[in-house]
Amino acid sequence: MSAATGRSHAATGFESFAQRVWPTLHARARRLCGCHHEAEDLAQETLLVLSRRWADFDDRGRPAAYVAAVLHSRFVDARRHSRWRHERLDGFPPGRDAAAADTSGAVEQRVSLDSALAGLGVRQRDVLVLRYLCDLDVRTVSRMLCVSQSTVRSQEARALRSLRCRGGLG
């Protein structure tokens, strides 16, 4: 196999992987960021990092685990360096009204969850997203956040208690 063919095969493999993981990657990024546009930027940046390292993964490689680690690392770095500016808009963008909004059950649940998560502190939100939406164990979350396992458990308990008190959980 020629070098060009190998690169073409690798590019095809990466594109296939990226298309397969995009919905999950974007959903996780949205839960972390709380904003659709920031989530898209974060997810695209994550895939860009992976594309540069794609040749390092063979058939036994775990690109999905690497993607999750890169996603969170990039998110924490962005927050640490305050690179993103936050601007909250109330209501609908100009030219759109409430009648044009999608009110399906899934959208309402997502908005409700986003709103509940937005009311938490950054560390509590990170812990809940990683524990429940990314389905990671306490040990993995503690390593990703560079905190002790007891800190993860206490932040999780406080966040869940806060959500229950505000009616954010059933």
Image: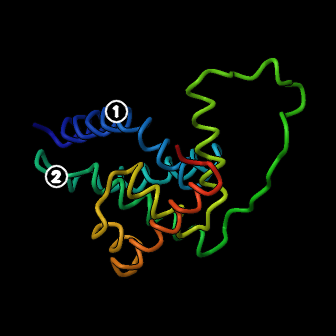
Q: Quadrant of the N terminus?
A: top left
Asked which quadrant contains residue 40, the reply is top right
- The label on residue 61 is 2
Kindly give the residue lying farthest to the right in the view shown: 94
Tell me the element at label 1: helix
| Mark 2 surroundings within 10 Å by alpha-carbon count, few (fewer than 14), some (14 through 19), many (20 or more) | few
Mark 2 is on which residue type? Gly
| Mark 1 surroundings within 10 Å by alpha-carbon count, few (fewer than 14), some (14 through 19), many (20 or more) | few
Image spot of residue 76 (x, y percent): 51, 69
- The label on residue 20 is 1
Above or below 40: residue 98: above
Kindly give the residue lying farthest to the top in the view shown: 99
Sequence-wise, which precedes: disc 2 or disc 1?
1
Tell me the element at label 2: loop
Image spot of residue 54 (x, y percent): 28, 51
Mark 1 is on which residue type? Arg
- The label on residue 129 is none
Q: Nearer the viewer, residue 120 or 60?
A: 120
- The residue at the point 44 percent across, 61 percent down is 72
Image spot of residue 60 (x, y percent): 11, 49
- The residue at the point 68 percent across, 22 percent down is 103
What's the image's color scheme?
rainbow
Image spot of residue 92 (x, y percent): 83, 33
Q: Is residue 1 left or right of residue 43?
A: left
- The residue at the point 33 percent across, 77 percent down is 149
The CA span between labels 2 and 1 is: 16 Å
Q: Is residue 75 left or right of residue 166?
A: left
- The residue at the point 61 percent across, 46 percent down is 114
Asked which quadrant contains residue 109, the reply is top right
